Amino acid sequence: MQMFPKQEVVAMLLAGGQGSRLGVLTKKLAKPAVPFGGKYRIIDFPLSNCVNSGVEAVGILTQYQPLILTEYIGNGQPWDLDGMHSGVNCLSPYQAIQGANWYSGTANAIYQNITYIERYDPDYVVILSGDHIYKMDYNKMLEFHKEKNAACTIAVIDVPLEEASRFGILNTREDGEIYEFDEKPECPKSTNASMGIYIFSWKELRKYLTEDEKNENSSHDFGKDVLPAMLAAGEKMFAYPFEGYWKDVGTIDSLWEANMDLLDPKVTLDLKDIYSRNPMMPPHYVSADANIQNSMIADGCNVEGDLEFSILFAGVTVGKGAVVNSSIIMPGAVIEEGANVQFAIVAENTVIGKNAKVGQSPETMENRDEWGITVVGENTVIADGVVIPANRMIDTDTEVTAE
Amino acid sequence: MRSNDVLGFIFAGTLDEKIPELAVSRTTASVPIGGKYRVIDFVLSNMTNSGINNVGIVAQSNFLSLTDHVGSGSAYDLSKRRSNLTLLTPYGGNSFSNAVETIYNIHGYLEHCREEYVLIEQGNVITNFDYNALFDFHSKNNSDITFIYKKCVVPAGYDRPVTLEIDESGKVNQIYVKPDNMAEESNFMYGALLLRKEVLMNEIREALSRNQLDIKRVFQETVGKFRAFAFENKGYTSFVSSINAYFSFNMDLMKKEVRDELFDPKRPIYTKVRDDAPSRYGLESKVKNSIIAQGCVIDGEVENCVISKGVYVGKGARLSNCIVMQDSHIGADTNLNYVIIDKDVQIKDGRSLMGFESYPSYIAKKSVV
C-alpha cells in the first residue's frame, strides 16, 4: 500500500455546480473555469490561496462539464500542486460496488471522497468553493480555528446592512461564536456574511457527514443540513472575520463588476501571487491608430482600435476604428473594424463583425430598468453591421445575421 | 532520417564580444529581446517544434542567466523521459576557447547521445525555421554535410564571415572565409549546419592533430572531401551581431508581417514564463506602435517601444524608440528617446536621456539614473 505523508490540512474545492446564473458562459464549462481578469480562470484564486497558505493537498470536486476544468488543472504544475506525495486531484463522481451516484449535494460530494481525504490523515479540512474572487491566507484562519478549539470555523465578511439580505448571515456572540444561521434574512440582525469558506476539524466533520448521509430527509448540503445539524448539537462554531477584497462572481453582473474592479485604483485586490496557466503568445501589439485608456491587456493581443475601461484576454484582436468600452473580451475573440462593443462580455473565439454594435451604455436606454450587460457566448459570429442591444444573451456556436 | 535522430547543438556565446554592454553579465543567447524572450528561445523552439528532443547548449562563460532562463528545459518540452536539455560548460580545466577544442572536449557527451546526426546552431540567430525541410533536403541529396545560409549582405559585426559558392542543385563548390567583397549580397553561412555525428568527430580529431583550431577552416576543408550542400533559410532572420542589429530587430517587431512569421501559432516560440498579470493602462496613458509584455503599468506616453514584463512607466513620462527590459521603473515626467534600458533600472522622475537611431544609448542593468 502506498503511504502518504500526513497533511495537517486538506482542501476540498467544490467545483461541480452548473453556475446556471452565468447563462451561456457556463454552457460548455464549469463555473470555476470561467475566464476572469484578463488571463485567469476563477479557480486560480482559491488554488493560489491554497498554495500561498501552505495547503498542499487539494481535491477538486467536479461534476458539471468537467473537460475544460480538468484539462486546465492538469497535473497542477502552474500552482506548484504537482508534489510527489500531494498536490491537486480532480475528483469526479464514480461507480463502485454499491452502485453509482452523482454528487447529490455539497456535503455528499465530500462524503463520497472520504477515502481521498483520509489518505492524508488530516487534522483539518478546508472546504472552498470555486466562484469567489479574493486573496486569503487560510493559515491565519486555521490559527483562529485552533485557538478557539472550534469544530467548525466559517469565514465571514462585513457587508453593508442594506445588502445583507442577499447573503447567508451568521449571528455571533461577542467572541465570535455562532449561535444562529440566517439564510438570506429579510431583517438581518448582523452584517456578517458567510464567504462559503469553512474549516472543520476532520473528526467532527467526518461524524456529521456520515450522519447526514443516513438522513433521508437531508439535501446533503453544507449550508442547509450539515452546519445547522452541528449547531443544533452544540458544537463550537466560530465566525472568522476577513478583511479585504472578496466578491462572489456567480452572476453576470457580479462577474462583470469584479472584472471592472481590477481597473479601479481604489480596489485593493492585487493580482500578484495569483498563478495560472500561461498561453505561449508574444507580448501584445498596440498600433499607431489605437487609443487605450484604463484597460488591461494580456499577451498575444493586437489592438488597432479604441479601448476604455475594458479587459482583453490573450490573443484578442481589436480592428481599426473599433470601439470597446466597459467590456470584457475573452481569449481569441475578434472585434472587427468599426465594431462597437459596450458594456458586454464577449466569450472565447467569438467574432464581432465589421460595424456591428453589441451592448449599450445605461445612458442610452429609454428605460433604464431594461438595461443590463450583453453577453455573447463562445465561438459565435455576429455578422457585419448587426445590432445587439443591452441586456441580451447570445448563445454559443451560433451565427447572428441581420434580418 | 527522422528529427528524433538529430541532436541539437547550440553555441550560446556567439559574437558575445560584439555586444559587450548587453553581454557583460550574460551570453548572447540569454540577452532579453522582444519584450518577453531571450535570443535562444527562437532556436530552441525551432528545434522542439521540428521534433528534435535532445539539445545540448555550449556556454563557455557568464552562463548564470542562461541556466536560470532555460532551466531544466521544461518550457521547451525538453525535460521528459525521452527529451533532454543539457548545458555544456567548461570542466576540469578543459579549454572551451575555440569551437574545435570545445567539440573535442565534449566528445563524451556527443558519443553518449544516441542520435546519429548533429544540427549545429548559433545562439545569436532569430528566425522561425522548420528544420524538417532541411532534413528532407539533406536525405534527398544524400548529403554528408548541409550548411544553412541566408542570401544577404553580411551583417555588421561578422569580422570573418563564411560565404558559400553553390551551384543550382544546392551543391557547395567553394567555401570562403572572410571573402574580399562583402558589400554585395552573398550566400552567408551563419554557423548552422547538419552532419553525421561520426563525420563531425572525425573531422575535429583530424583538425586537432594538425593543430587546426579554426572551425571555419575545418568546414572549408570539407568541400571536395564530402558531399556538401547548402540549404537556404528564406524566412525572416535577424542576427544579434551588434547593438544596432539588436535595436533594429526589436523595432522590426512593429511590423505585422514580421510578427506573423516569427510568432506563427503553429510553431510557437516558447520561453520561461513568469506569472505576471495582464498589463494595465492608466487614465492618462497614450501608447502608439509598441510591443508591451505582461505585468506592466503604463501611465505615460509610449511610442515605437518594446516594453518588457513588469515595467512601470510613470505619469507624464515620454518614451519613444526605446527598449525597456524587465522590471525597470521609468519615473514620472521623464523624457527618453533611443535608449536601451537593461533590467531593473530606475530612471528617476524628470530625467531626460537621448540616443540616436544609429547610436542608441544604453543604461546598464540595475543602474539608477
Image: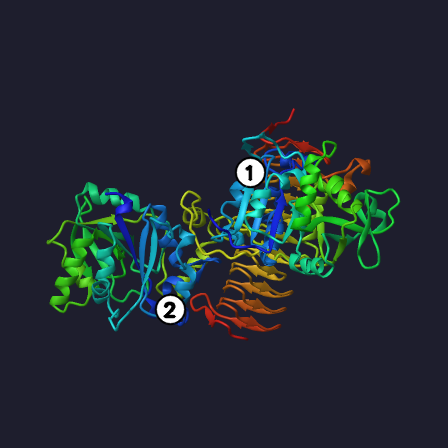
Instruction: Give residue B263's position: percent from left, percent from top.
Output: 44, 48
> Dot 1, how many residues are within 10 Å of its Cα: few (below 14), some (14-19), or many (20+)?
many
Q: Nearer the viewer, residue B168 or B278?
A: B278
Query: Could you tell me residue A276's position as x and y percent?
Result: 55, 51
Identity, as a three-letter code, of the amino acid under mark 2: Ile
Q: Is residue A182 depicted above or below A155 in this figure?
A: above
From the top left corner, tell me how far across and down residue B160 is, in percent.
Answer: 24, 65
Q: Is B57 on the left-hand or right-hand side of A133?
A: left
Q: In front: A163, or A363?
A: A163
Q: Amino acid at mark 1?
A: Asn
| Residue A130 visible to an observer of this rendering | yes
Percent coordinates x, y for residue A335 in the rendering = 59, 40
Q: Which residue is mark 1?
A: A349
In the structure shown, which secondary structural element does the residue marked by tag 2 occupy?
A: loop
Task: Name the residue tied to disc 2.
Answer: B19
Label 1 resides on the chain identified as: A
Residue in the image at 29% along x and 69% along y: B90
